[in-house]
Image (tube, helix red, strand yellow):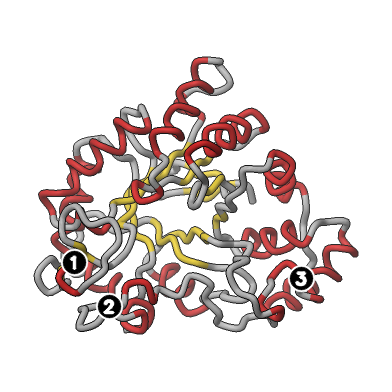
Amino acid sequence: MTALKFRNNDEMPILGLGTFRSEPNEVYDAVLSAIKIGYRHIDCAAAYGNEKEVGNAIGEAIKQRLVTREDLWVTSKLWNASHGEENVIPALNTTLKDLQLDYLDLYLIHWPVALRKGTEMPEKACDFIPLSEVPLTNTWKGMEATLEQGRVKHIGVSNFNENHLKEIMTTAVHRPEMNQVEMHPFLQQKELKAICAHYDMHLTAYAPLGSLVDDNSSLRLLENDTIKTIAEARHMSPAQVALAYTIQRGIAVIPKSTNEARLLQNLETLNHMLTEEDMALLKGLDKGHRFIDGKFWEVENGPYTAEKIWNT
C-alpha cells in the first residue's frame, strides 16, 4: 500500500514528511531534499512556527520544476487559539499565505482544546476557553466552510477521542475524513482505529518512531529487541520496521527528519514488506504508552486534563 484513498478517490501518499520540531533554519533544506528524493506528502501546522520556511521550500521545488502543486499533498492544522466558526477562515488564510498555496489538501483541527486568541501555549487557567463556550461543533462549521469555499480539499481532526468524534457527527454536514494521532508499536490505538473505521475515517500516525524524550530504556522504541531482531532478519533498519508495521495496518505515517540519509531510509520503507509472523510479534509490543502525554494542557484550575482529552 502506497496511498490512502479518500471518499472522492483522491489519494494521499501513506508516508509523508513531518515538520514538527524542525527548526526554521533546517526545515527548508529538509522539505526541498525530501521532495527531490520522492516525498509528495508534507505535514505542517501553524503551531510549528515554520510554515513560511516550508512554503519557501515548496515554492522553490515548483520553481525548479521538481513537482507541480498537483503532485503534492499538503496538510496543515488549525491552532487552538483559532477555535470558533468565525476564526477558522482567517487562520486558514494565514497558513495559505505562509505556505504560498492557493489550497490545502487536508486541514485538521489540531487539538480538542480551545485557547484565548493570541495564546501560543497556555500558562494559566484564563488562557483557556472551555469547550462548553466554544463547542467543537461550532469550530467544525468553520472547517466545513473552508471545504465549501474550495480552499481545502479534505477536512479532519487531530488528537480526537471517540466522544469528540461523536459530538462532531451530531451536526456535521461533511464528516471528518482523517484523525491524526500518536501511534507506533508501543501505542497501537486498536479501539480508536476501529471507531475511525466505523466512521469511514482514515488515521495518520504522528511520532511513528516514538520519541527520545523518555530516559527509560524499555521505552526506546528503536532499541526494542523484537524490532531489532526483525530488522536484522529482513535487512531493514529498526525505524523501517516500526514504520512498516503501522503502514501495513493501513495507517499513514509522517516521520520527521532533517537528515537526508534518514529521509531516504524512511521513504525506502515502502520497498519492504513484513510477514504475518512479524506483524504478530509487533502487535504484542503494545504498552499503551504515550510519548506526547498531553499534560502540557494541565494548569491549576484549568478546564482540561490529559485524561479527559484522551479518554472521555
Farthest residue to the top: give it. Answer: 64
Q: Is residue 271 above or below residue 38?
A: below
Q: Is residue 192 above or below residue 41?
A: below
Secondary-structure class at tag 2 = loop
- The residue singled out by tag 2 in the image is 299
Circle 2/circle 3 CB separation < 8 Å: no
**Kind of residue indicated by mark 2:** Val
Tell me where residue 66 appears, x and y as whole percent.
58, 21
Q: Earlier in the sequence, mark 1 or mark 3?
A: 1
Mark 1 nearby-residue class (10 Å; few <14, some 14–19, many ≥20): some
Secondary-structure class at tag 1 = helix
**Residue at the (64%, 51%) spot, across then down:** 1
- The residue singled out by tag 1 in the image is 127
Task: Give the spatial CA distance, label 1 vs label 2.
Answer: 10 Å
Tell me where residue 261 appears, x and y as whole percent.
74, 41
Q: Is residue 99 above or below residue 7?
A: above
Q: Earlier in the sequence, mark 2 or mark 3?
A: 3
Circle 1/circle 2 CB separation < 8 Å: yes
Tell me where residue 299 appears, x and y as whole percent.
27, 78
Q: Earlier in the sequence, mark 1 or mark 2?
A: 1
- The residue singled out by tag 3 in the image is 223
Label at residue 92: none
| 279 horizontally vs 213: left or right | right
Mark 2 nearby-residue class (10 Å; few <14, some 14–19, many ≥20): some
